[in-house]
Image (spheres, rainbow, N blue to C red):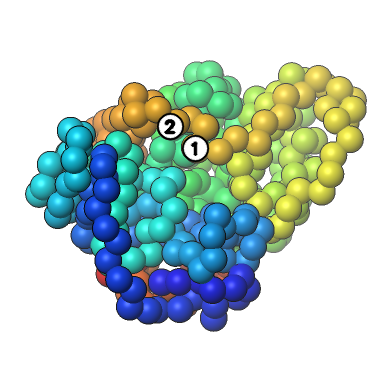
């Protein structure tokens, strides 16, 4: 699936292309399932600039190793593997650096892996190494019924953290409750700042996890307790406007970070440890994988349209 020029979902073009040659340290994998993420929309629309044009979108997938190049020791032919954070996933097969592939445990299916690698490893670093809420803390998680939200809210509850989630519909509210939120706010009907203050008795939350961006960022700062942490990890509603950082001191010496997964899985050791933590909580049953919908890869334009309209729940998987 190629993008020759940035724009709407109609810019996604299903084409035959020659297979890439296999190089040193690389493996060829046949995809069995591909994950859909909002970062794919950012690249398609040009919010994030692709390194080349045309480009193949997509950041995560699962599949089977079909061939390995010289000096590959991390995987072997026939291995079930998955990856995240490596652009170019919207395809039937590809060549990829073998060091970025993670072998899959038997208990994790290919579709589950495609649904959780990017979103689940994002949840892992947000909770364990970025926001780092402690047992007994209360946090606010925007888009709680989204792909990252459903995984992170379950994981946070498992860690003893109380989660206030925001959603956009009654259906999504029920899903968020079922997946770990102690309180759910429908931002289309309620003022989430007022609701958070009521829930916390005006104490505020320890951390806000915000992937929505423009429409939630400023108000989210009003939900934090003194020395609280604002974690802005996406912008589904648009880019956050420029910020005068003195507002952080005015609102209680707040902390602010804008992290990306790539910074937390930069080495193979970090990658395997992060994925290992994710697989462990899924296998234990503490975190359930919600695949809300699947689409054929060739129909990914429709999947993008539904994702941007917030008409999806949980994770979306594309099938080659």
Q: Quadrant of residue 10?
A: bottom right
Is residue 148 shown left or right of residue 103? right
Residue 37 is situated, as x and y percent measured from the top left of the image, at: 48, 56
Q: Looking at the figure, which quarter contains the N terminus?
A: bottom left
Query: Where is residue 288 shown, x and y percent of the image?
Result: 32, 45
Q: Which residue is mark 2?
A: 265
Q: Position of residue 132 (x, y in %)?
A: 54, 22
Residue at left offset 50%, top offset 53%: 145
For the C terminus, the quadrant is bottom left
Q: Is residue 42 above or below residue 152?
A: below
Q: Secondary structure at mark 2?
A: loop
On the rendered structure, is 310 left or right of 27?
right
Measured in 3D between alpha carbons, the distance from the residue under mark 1 to the one under mark 2, in whole angstroms, is 5 Å
Q: Is residue 38 left or right of residue 287?
A: right
Q: Position of residue 251 (x, y in %)?
A: 85, 27
Q: Residue at x 62, y 66 (%)?
A: 45
The residue located at (26%, 42%) in the rendering is 24
Residue 236 in view of the camera: no
| Numbered disc 1: secondary structure | helix
158, above or below 25, in the image: above
- Contact (Cβ within 8 Å) of mark 1 with mark 2: yes
Residue at 54% x, 60% y is 52
Say which residue label 1 marks: 262
**Taking 46 as reference, is 106 left or right?**
left
Q: Nearer the viewer, residue 190 or 126?
A: 126
């Amino acid at each position: 699936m190629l993008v020759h020029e940035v724009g709407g979902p109609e810019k996604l073009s299903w084409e035959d292309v020659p297979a890439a040659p296999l190089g040193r340290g690389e493996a060829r994998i046949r995809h069995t399932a591909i994950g859909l993420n909002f970062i794919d929309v950012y690249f398609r629309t040009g919010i994030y600039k692709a390194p080349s044009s045309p480009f193949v979108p997509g950041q995560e997938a699962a599949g089977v190793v079909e061939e390995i190049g010289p000096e590959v020791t991390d995987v072997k032919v026939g291995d079930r593997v998955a990856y995240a954070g490596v652009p170019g996933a919207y395809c039937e097969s590809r060549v990829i650096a073998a060091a970025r592939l993670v072998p899959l445990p038997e208990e994790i299916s290919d579709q589950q892996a495609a649904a959780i690698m990017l979103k689940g490893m994002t949840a892992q670093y947000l909770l364990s190494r970025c926001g780092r809420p402690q047992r007994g803390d209360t946090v606010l998680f925007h888009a709680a019924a989204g792909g990252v939200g459903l995984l992170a809210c379950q994981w946070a509850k498992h860690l003893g953290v109380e989660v206030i989630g925001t959603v956009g519909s009654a259906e999504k509210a029920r899903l968020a409750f079922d997946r770990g939120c102690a309180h759910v706010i429908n931002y289309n009907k309620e003022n989430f700042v007022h609701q958070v203050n009521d829930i916390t008795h005006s104490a505020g939350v320890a951390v806000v996890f915000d992937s929505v961006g423009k429409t939630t960022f400023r108000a989210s700062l009003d939900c934090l307790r003194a020395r609280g942490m604002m974690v802005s990890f996406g912008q589904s509603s648009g880019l956050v406007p420029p910020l005068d950082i003195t507002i952080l001191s005015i609102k209680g010496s707040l902390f602010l970070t804008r992290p990306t997964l790539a910074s937390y899985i930069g080495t193979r050791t970090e990658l395997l440890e992060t994925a290992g933590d994710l697989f462990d909580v899924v296998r234990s049953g503490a975190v359930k994988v919600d695949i809300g919908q699947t689409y054929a890869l060739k129909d990914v334009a429709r999947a993008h349209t539904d994702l941007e309209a917030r008409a999806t729940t949980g994770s979306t998987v594309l099938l080659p």
